[in-house]
Image (cartoon, rainbow, N blue to C red):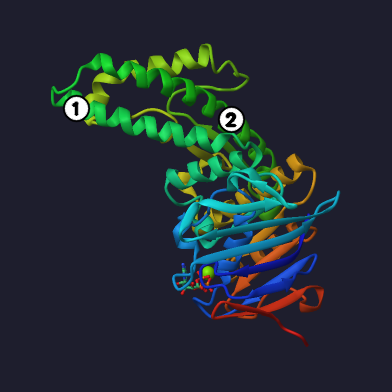
């Protein structure tokens, strides 16, 4: 799929943006703080997936204005489609969102129409950084192919908070242990299901990622990925999340109860799991070099794009926010070669990009205005 036209006004600092985009390559150049990432975010907004920058609704509107609007037209194999997204400061809850003129109640209803993969400098820390980042990566990846997934994660997190509060209260003798059960049953139900979904996604990811890693290391290194569960020893072939897996999750919570009360938080569960890997048999977490971490991060994102592509049977739009400049020339070439049949939006501060300018369009971003450069 590819975006043909973008309009944006009052979305953060963006002003009167009205551009025809190139089917393949779109490069947005500008100094710092001019609106490049804001433009990427405006596109992402229309994907119906939650903000990759954690922007709250009211932060989306230009601080000097009362309304914002974003319009994106795109084509997939079937037809041309339009998304309209507008919101005013006085009625943040009542957004004006539509797909092909049909009103949508919430932004998440847009899900599954404009499919994008966004790549930010923070993603380059994916392999090296904390497990939390990798969990977030997995959750976002799963939510892109399964719309009902995000609310489950939100619910799980709310319940964990309740449980942890209760654990502390029990430790101080203000509450009774028996009160935990209502949370534990819910945690085990959700946790078992989420574990299966994450495990299955990781398996797919592993297939794409090991192939890509083999290529980037020119056949020298073998990558294996796996989902490290703090609850289950092995999830292979297991799908009975409302039976056996639920019971096991529940049992693990019970077994750790006294320790949880002593520590004041829930120590085992999907909120402590990780996406792990080995390269040539050595644990990435303990042994990988800086370069290996970087390659792995890139590959995880590319594999994410490939899985999405397979799932929707179309190519997603790739949004590369400031990442190419962070990579050395050979990794830049690698990324570019892997996405060259998809539509790409790239932001950068300098003009040393590994692309032929004539194979796409270059835009200048300045003080929220976006203008096409004409030779
Ligand atoms: N709600 C808002 N109203 C007005 N301006 C905003 C709002 N939110 C963010 N901005 C401003 O938008 C400007 C551009 O931000 P953006 O992140 O798009 O910059 P950028 O061009 O990507 O810069 P960099 O190269 O540093 O990443 C920032 O100066 C920021 O303060
Ligand atoms: Mg930026």
Residue furthest to the left: 173
Taking 261 as reference, is 101 left or right? Answer: right
Q: Residues within 10 Å of mark 2 (few under 14, many from 20)?
A: some
Total of numbered circles in the picture?
A: 2
Some atom of ligand 2 lies within 8 Å of the CB belonging to the residue at label 2: no
Q: Earlier in the sequence, mark 2 or mark 1?
A: 1
What mark, if any, has residue 197 been given in the picture? 2
- Which is in the foreground here, disc 2 or disc 1? 1
Badge 2 marks a residue whose secondary structure is helix
Residue, x 55% and y 69% (percent of image)? 10
Classify residue 180 by image quadrant.
top left
Q: Quadrant of the N terminus?
A: bottom right
Residue furthest to the front: 90
Q: Nearer the viewer, residue 288 or 197?
A: 197
Instruction: Name the residue carrying label 1.
Output: 169
Location of residue 106 with respect to 191 vertically, above or below = below
Residue, x 59% and y 48% (percent of image)? 107
Real-space CA distance between mark 2 and mark 1, rounded to the nearest whole angstrom: 33 Å
Badge 1 marks a residue whose secondary structure is helix
What mark, if any, has residue 153 been given in the picture? none
Query: Measured from the top left, where is residue 368 in percent x and y?
Result: 56, 77
Taking 169 as reference, is 148 left or right? Answer: right
Query: Measured from the top left, where is residue 375 in percent x and y?
Result: 78, 88
Query: Measured from the top left, where is residue 314 in percent x and y?
Result: 79, 48
Location of residue 311 with respect to 165 vertically, above or below = below
Check whether the beta carbons of the residues at disc 2 and disc 1 lie within 8 A of each other: no
Residue, x 24% and y 26% (percent of image)? 167
Can residue 156 be seen by looking at this rendering? yes
């Amino acid at each position: 799929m590819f975006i043909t036209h973008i309009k944006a006004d009052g979305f953060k600092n963006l002003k009167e943006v009205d551009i025809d985009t190139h089917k393949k390559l779109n490069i947005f150049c500008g100094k710092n703080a001019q609106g490049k990432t804001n433009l990427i975010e405006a596109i992402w907004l229309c994907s119906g997936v939650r903000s990759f920058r954690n922007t709250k609704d009211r932060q989306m509107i230009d601080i000097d204005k009362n309304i914002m609007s974003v319009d994106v037209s795109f084509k997939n194999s079937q037809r041309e489609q339009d998304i309209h997204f507008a919101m005013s400061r006085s009625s943040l809850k009542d957004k004006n969102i539509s797909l092909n003129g049909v009103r949508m109640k919430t932004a998440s209803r847009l899900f599954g129409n404009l499919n994008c993969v966004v790549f930010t400098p923070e993603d380059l820390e994916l392999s090296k950084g904390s497990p939390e980042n990798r969990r977030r990566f997995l959750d976002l990846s799963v939510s892109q192919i399964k719309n009902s997934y995000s609310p489950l994660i939100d619910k799980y997190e709310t319940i964990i908070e309740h449980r942890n509060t209760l654990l502390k209260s029990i430790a101080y003798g203000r509450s009774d242990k028996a009160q935990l059960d209502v949370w534990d049953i819910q945690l085990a139900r959700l946790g078992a299901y989420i574990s299966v979904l994450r495990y299955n996604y990781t398996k797919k990811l592993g297939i794409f990622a090991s192939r890509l890693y083999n290529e980037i290391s020119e056949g020298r290194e073998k990558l294996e990925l796996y989902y490290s569960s703090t609850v289950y020893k092995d999830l292979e072939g297991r799908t009975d999340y409302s039976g056996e897996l639920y019971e096991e999750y529940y049992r693990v919570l019970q077994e750790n109860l006294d320790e949880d009360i002593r520590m004041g938080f829930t120590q085992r569960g999907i909120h402590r799991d990780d996406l792990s890997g080995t390269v040539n048999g050595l644990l990435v977490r303990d042994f990988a070099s800086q370069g290996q971490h970087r390659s792995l991060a890139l590959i995880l994102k590319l594999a994410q794009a490939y899985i999405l592509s397979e799932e929707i049977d179309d190519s997603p739009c790739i949004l590369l926010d400031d990442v190419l400049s962070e990579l050395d020339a050979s990794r830049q070439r690698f990324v570019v070669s892997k996405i060259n049949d998809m539509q790409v939006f790239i932001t950068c501060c300098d003009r040393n990009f590994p692309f032929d300018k004539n194979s796409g369009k270059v835009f200048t971003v300045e003080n929220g205005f976006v203008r096409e450069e004409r030779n």
